[in-house]
Amino acid sequence: MSDTCAALPIVVLISGSGTNLQAIIDAARSGELPVDICAVISNRPAAAGLDRARAAGIQAEALDHREFDGREDFDRALAERIDAHAPALVVLAGFMRILTPGFVRHYHGRLLNIHPSLLPDFRGLNTHARVIEAGVDCHGASVHFVADELDGGPVVLQVEVPVHAGDTVETLAARVLEQEHRLYPLAIRWFAEGRLQLQNGTAILDGKPLNAPCLLDADTGALKRCP
């Protein structure tokens, strides 16, 4: 990662351990992902993901949401921090904040999120526990453009993960997270290569509307379906 952004400049937002951040860092280092991570910003100063960023030579910044009077004030300050790096894409990688409509509009078409479920099913928190409680046999993860609605916005790419008898929240979460580390760098790469964009509320891949999300094969890592 260089001091001056080359390739596609991105900023990554995190709140926790940063394992998806690490997957993005690794893919960029290997040359598989043509991005330059200009900064990693966390709303939690003690987030372990900030240490991952520092270890990779990436600028790591903390902006504690508890120091602001409300979401609007925090989001305005966060946008200022982000915009100082002039990113072409903002990547939410375990950023556990509900974003205000003004923030989402400001980054319209250049704000991606990964969510641990097969959207639109199981939006919100505690997805793994809710999946087990619901008794479904298929779970997964989704990458989507961010919209005003919680975990809304056009879904770009998904991966399906089986739910096994006897699964706990921990075993299921680990199985999903392993696939997230494949899923997110691929979607970001599409955006960085100019293949993926948002037009009039629709995700466009290679010039064609995505009427349904592309599906990654959990076993091979290859695309299983891409309408």
Image (cartoon, grey):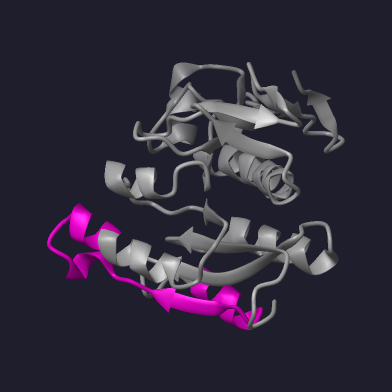
In this view, which residue lies farthest toward the left?
69
Find the magenta span and give its range.
49-75
- Looking at the figure, which quarter contains the C terminus? top right
- For the point 54% across and 62% down, which residue is it? 87
Vertically, is 193 above or below 150? below
Instruction: Name which quarter of the figure residue 37 lies in.
Output: bottom right
Q: Nearer the viewer, residue 86 or 76?
A: 86
Residue 180 x/y as whole percent: 65, 44
Residue 184 at least partly seen: yes
Task: Determine whether, in the image, residue 106 is placed left or right of residue 193.
Answer: left
Residue 219 x/y as whole percent: 83, 34
Residue 100 at least partly seen: no
Vertically, is 41 above or below 138? below
Q: Nearer the viewer, residue 154 or 215?
A: 154
Task: Determine whether, in the image, residue 154 is placed left or right of residue 205.
Answer: left
- For the point 70% across and 76% down, which residue is it? 1
Q: Nearer the viewer, residue 119 or 171?
A: 119
Q: Nearer the viewer, residue 146 or 129?
A: 146
**Residue 55 lies within the magenta run:** yes
**Residue 186 lies within the magenta run:** no
Residue 172 x/y as whole percent: 59, 37
Task: Determine whether, in the image, residue 137 is placed left or right of residue 85.
Answer: right
Residue 132 x/y as whole percent: 49, 26
Q: Report the number of numbered marks.
A: 0
Instruction: Name which quarter of the figure residue 123 lies in.
Output: top left
- For the point 45% across and 18% down, which residue is it? 134
Vertically, is 186 above or below 225? below
Vertically, is 213 above or below 100? above
- For the point 19% across and 70% down, which residue is it? 67
